[in-house]
Image (cartoon, rainbow, N blue to C red):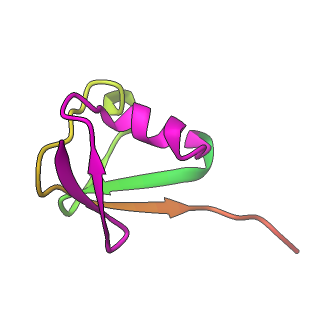
């Protein structure tokens, strides 16, 4: 198990977790969000290839439309 920080909250994940799995597990819509990993915005093309390491910091930003 690894500990990461997601939007300021510490969570535990499986050792082999990739970013794309985390977004699916949390039922997030990838077309409506941006992910920042350790201070760097990560392109969607890399979500399925990016493994998460102990101590990583993620910011998940969701876009919400409205009127």
Give the image location of residue 38, x and y in percent. Answer: 18, 59
**Magenta segment range?**
1-30
Give the image location of residue 65, x and y in percent. Answer: 76, 64
Within the magenta stretch, is there residue 9? Answer: yes
Give the image location of residue 3, x and y in percent. Answer: 19, 54
Q: Is residue 45 left or right of residue 62?
A: left
Q: Is residue 56 left or right of residue 30?
A: left
In front: 60, or 9?
Answer: 9
Q: Residue at x 18, y 34 (%)?
A: 15
In front: 6, or 40?
Answer: 6
Q: Residue at x 30, y 32 (%)?
A: 18
Give the position of the N terminus as an image quadrant.
Answer: top left
Within the magenta stretch, is there residue 31? Answer: no
Indicate the quadrant where residue 66 lies. bottom right
Q: Residue at x 28, y 32 (%)?
A: 17
Give the image location of residue 5, x and y in percent. Answer: 26, 63
Indicate the quadrant where residue 6 lies. bottom left
Q: Residue at x 52, y 36 (%)?
A: 24
Indicate the quadrant where residue 42 lies. top left
Q: Is residue 32 left or right of residue 4?
A: right
Give the position of the C terminus as an image quadrant.
Answer: bottom right
In front: 25, or 66?
Answer: 25
């Amino acid at each position: 198990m690894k500990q990461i920080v997601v939007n300021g909250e510490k969570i535990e994940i499986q050792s082999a977790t990739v970013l794309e799995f985390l977004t699916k597990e949390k039922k997030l819509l990838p077309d409506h969000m941006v992910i920042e990993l350790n201070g760097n915005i990560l392109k969607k093309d890399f979500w399925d290839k990016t493994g998460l390491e102990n101590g990583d910091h993620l910011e998940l930003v969701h876009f919400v439309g409205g009127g």
